[in-house]
């Protein structure tokens, strides 16, 4: 059995500033084989109270912080959401990746029209020549490699529904949040251009409870030794998931809220 485990001290941080949390040690035990524990090392990991107090301080108080925290949908709401809305958000995030977001938003009503409100069944019947014509439509952003993902991700959604014998909304809503990185990897493997931040950002926009690997979140995790090496590695993803799961156990907050709070505790104090 392999995995990374975090054991935190129960001593509260109270209202002390974040820097005082360096005194709090968290034993990280990495079990790398069934033989036994390979190594033990101490890491200074601030607990939830430390993070919350520091985020409040940087954002102008508790009321201001709460107004900035993201909302998530319930499992029942995600279950009822149509496959077309999942495909639409996947497409939106793919086009926003590496592009000016406001341009995509301005043209989005035309995207909905050109792609038949992202009707999955209708898109699956679209022939190649029609797809090429749509990619040249000036009403949308003319990027053929990204336009192709509309039909490819419609196929991913359809194949998922057939294989799992349930709607895509049921599939997403049933995914355990303590392994949300598993859903990221699923979208990366079976979807088109849904790796990196595109898949996770789409899930967050839809209302799925997920943390994000934004620049400030990644900076925080690296500065505290939680993540090292490539952030897309299995090791890094599992370590990040374990840390956010632990924060959720401490606080009762969603992964999305905790991700936003962590982002406020590092870097240039940007909204993420």
Image (cartoon, helix red, strand yellow):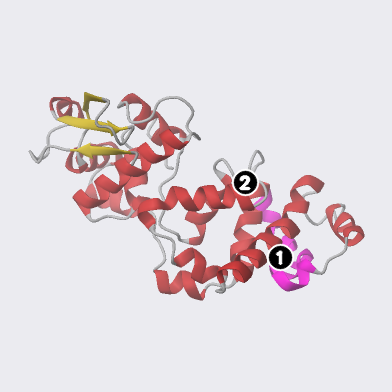
Q: Quick check: 199 above or below 269? A: below
Instruction: Residue lying at the far front in this picture: please name it.
Output: 35
Where does residue 136 sit, x and y in percent of width and height? 87, 52
Where does residue 73 sit, x and y in percent of width and height? 42, 66
Where does residue 158 sit, x and y in percent of width and height? 66, 67
Determine the image quadrant of residue 40: top left
Alpha carbon distance from label 2 to label 1: 16 Å
Instruction: Residue lying at the far right in this picture: please name it.
Output: 129
Question: In front here: 100 or 209?
Answer: 209
The residue where tag 1 is placed is 112
Q: Which numbered disc flags the more N-terminal residue, 2 or 1? A: 2
The residue where tag 2 is placed is 101
The segment highlighted magenta reads: 103-124
One can see residue 184 in this view? yes
Question: In front here: 150 or 28?
Answer: 28
Tag 1, which secondary structure? helix
Task: Say left or right for 139 vs 59.
Answer: right
Question: In front here: 1 or 189?
Answer: 1
Determine the image quadrant of residue 22: top left
Give the residue at x 39% y 55%. Answer: 70
Badge nearest the viewer, 2 or 1: 1
Q: Quick check: 130 above or below 268? A: below
């Amino acid at each position: 059995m392999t995995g990374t485990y975090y054991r935190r001290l129960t001593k509260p941080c109270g209202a002390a500033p974040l820097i005082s949390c360096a005194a709090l040690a968290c034993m990280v035990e990495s079990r790398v084989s069934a033989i036994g524990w390979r190594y033990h090392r101490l890491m200074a990991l601030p607990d939830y109270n430390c993070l919350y107090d520091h985020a409040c301080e940087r954002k102008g108080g508790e009321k201001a912080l709460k107004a900035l925290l993201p909302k998530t949908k319930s499992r029942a709401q995600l279950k009822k959401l149509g496959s077309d809305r999942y495909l639409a958000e996947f497409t939106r995030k793919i086009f926003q990746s590496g592009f000016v977001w406001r341009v995509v938003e301005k043209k989005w009503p035309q995207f909905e029209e050109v792609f038949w409100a992202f009707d999955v069944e209708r898109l699956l019947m679209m022939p190649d020549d029609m797809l090429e014509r749509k990619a040249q439509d000036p009403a949308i952003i003319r990027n053929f490699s990204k336009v192709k993902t509309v039909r490819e991700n419609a196929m991913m959604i359809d194949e998922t529904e057939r294989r799992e014998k349930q709607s895509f909304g049921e599939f997403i809503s049933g995914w355990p949040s303590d392994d949300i990185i598993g859903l990221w990897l699923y979208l990366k493997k079976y979807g088109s251009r849904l790796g990196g931040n595109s898949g996770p950002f789409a899930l967050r926009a839809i209302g799925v409870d997920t943390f994000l690997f934004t620049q400030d979140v990644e900076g925080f995790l690296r500065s505290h030794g939680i993540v090292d090496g490539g952030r897309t590695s299995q090791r890094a993803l599992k370590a990040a998931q374990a840390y956010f799961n632990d924060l959720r156990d401490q606080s009762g907050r969603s992964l999305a809220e905790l991700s936003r709070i962590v982002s406020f505790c590092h870097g240039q104090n940007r909204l993420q």
